[in-house]
Image (cartoon, helix red, strand yellow):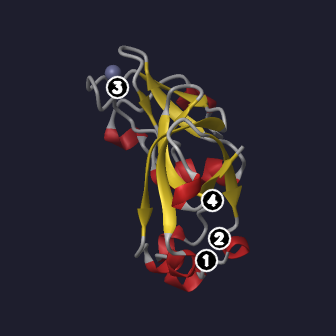
Amino acid sequence: MQDTDATTTGPLAPDDITADSPFTLPGFFADLADGQLVAAQCTECDEHMLPPRPACYNCGSRAVTLEEQPRTGEVISYTSVNRPPSAFADLAPITVAVIELDSSARLSGRVEAPLEEVSIGDRVELQVCDPEAIGIDPEFQLSYEEDWPIHVFKPV
Ligand SMILES: [Zn+2]
């Protein structure tokens, strides 16, 4: 979050959104690579947006602020993906879950556990990894994703 003004209110016009704005996916992943998990929160209705969006998808307000999120939360829903995207093929089958963080923001992602070891309500902690460190072939990533970190939820 290099732009402190951007942490107090969302961009009000499209021209205010630069490529590295924290309200874009590249900006979100740049913050994540720096160790910050950032969500937007609507000041009108309290809806969380993770990754951040420049307008609330619940009420449409552009009065959104950015807030660093806790890394811990619990499994809300989960499933097994037997044929994941190519980059994750060697890890198949993978467990994918919707996690409600302790702030109540929700984020989906892979859980580092087999399906039969995961239950609704399980506590997990988000970890940010270098893709190659967990066996993901960078050749299968889209070019704009190459510098993006991979997040995974580890059971705690
Ligand atoms: Zn709202």
Disc 4 target residue? 112
Disc 1 target residue? 136
- Given this view, does label 4 or label 1 mark the residue nearer the observer? 4
The span from disc 2 to disc 3 (Cα, nearest Å) is: 34 Å
Closer to the chain start, of discs 4 and 3, is: 3
- Given this view, does label 3 or label 1 mark the residue nearer the observer? 1
Left or right of residue 14, residue 99 in this image: right
Few, some or many residues within 10 Å of mark 1 (<14, 14–19, 20+): some
Q: Position of residue 7 (x, y in %)?
A: 57, 28
C-beta proximity under 8 Å, tags 1 and 2 = yes
Q: Hey, what amino acid is under mark 4? A: Glu
- Given this view, does label 2 or label 3 mark the residue nearer the observer? 2
Disc 3 target residue? 62
The secondary element bearing badge 3 is classed as: loop
| Dot label at residue 131 | 2
The secondary element bearing badge 2 is classed as: helix
Q: Hey, what amino acid is under mark 2? A: Pro
| Dot label at residue 63 | none
Q: Residue furthest front?
A: 116
Left or right of residue 145, residue 154 in this image: right
Q: Position of residue 3 (x, y in %)?
A: 61, 36
Q: Hey, what amino acid is under mark 3? A: Arg
Q: In which quadrant of the rendered view does residue 45 lie? A: top left
Few, some or many residues within 10 Å of mark 4 (<14, 14–19, 20+): some
Residue at 40% x, 76% y is: 83
- Given this view, does label 4 or label 3 mark the residue nearer the observer? 4
Would the CB of label 3 be found within 8 Å of ligand 1? no
The span from disc 4 to disc 3 (Cα, nearest Å) is: 36 Å
Q: Is residue 6 visible?
A: yes
The span from disc 1 to disc 2 (Cα, nearest Å) is: 5 Å
